[in-house]
Image (spheres, rainbow, N blue to C red):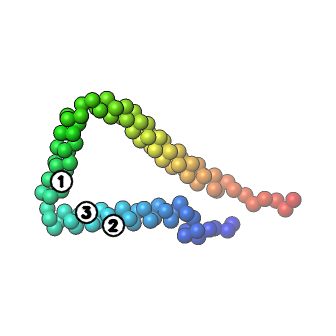
């Protein structure tokens, strides 16, 4: 059986790349928070939330349109979760079938 190298599989490479990038981003955020403390980050979050609430209150007429986007966002999140679940189930199924493979006969 000819096994492909780890780097020959695009899905594995993409997963490794995303893992490394995510790890680096979290480490950079952790180092930033250790240096400056939590106050600047909390101030940024409070400012963004208060501006959002103020703009929502000021534009009540558009709140109805915003509520129309909630089902769309929920649907997209559900679809992404289902796609991830199916991808993992397919990987488990293929892994379960791998030991059952047999070489074709000479005919």
Q: Mark 1 points at which residue?
A: 44
Q: Please tell me how crowded label 2 is: few (under 14), some (14-19), or many (20+) other residues with Cα within 10 Å.
A: few
Residue 20 location in percent, x, y? 39, 66
**Residue closer to the observer: 64 or 100:** 64
Depth check, mark 2 against mark 1: the one in front is: 1
* Visible residue check, residue 9: yes
Q: Please tell me how crowded label 3 is: few (under 14), some (14-19), or many (20+) other residues with Cα within 10 Å.
A: few
Q: Which mark is residue 34?
A: none
Q: Please tell me how crowded label 1 is: few (under 14), some (14-19), or many (20+) other residues with Cα within 10 Å.
A: few
**Kind of element beneath mark 1:** helix
Residue at left offset 84%, top offset 62%: 106
Q: Which mark is residue 29?
A: 3
On the rendered structure, is 54 left or right of 79? left
Q: Mark 2 points at which residue?
A: 24
**Kind of element beneath mark 3:** helix
Residue at left offset 14%, top offset 65%: 36
Quadrant of the rendered image containing residue 64: top left
Pick the quarter of the image with the N terminus: bottom right
């Amino acid at each position: 059986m000819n096994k492909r190298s780890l780097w020959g599989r695009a899905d594995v490479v993409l997963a490794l790349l995303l893992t490394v990038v995510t790890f680096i981003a979290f480490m950079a955020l952790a180092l930033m928070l250790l240096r400056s403390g939590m106050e600047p980050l909390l101030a940024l979050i409070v400012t963004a939330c208060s501006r959002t609430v103020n703009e929502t209150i000021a534009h009540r007429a558009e709140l109805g349109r915003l509520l129309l986007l909630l089902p769309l966002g929920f649907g997209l999140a559900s679809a992404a979760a289902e796609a991830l679940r199916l991808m993992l189930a397919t990987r488990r199924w293929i892994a379960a079938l791998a030991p059952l493979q047999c070489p074709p006969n000479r005919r």
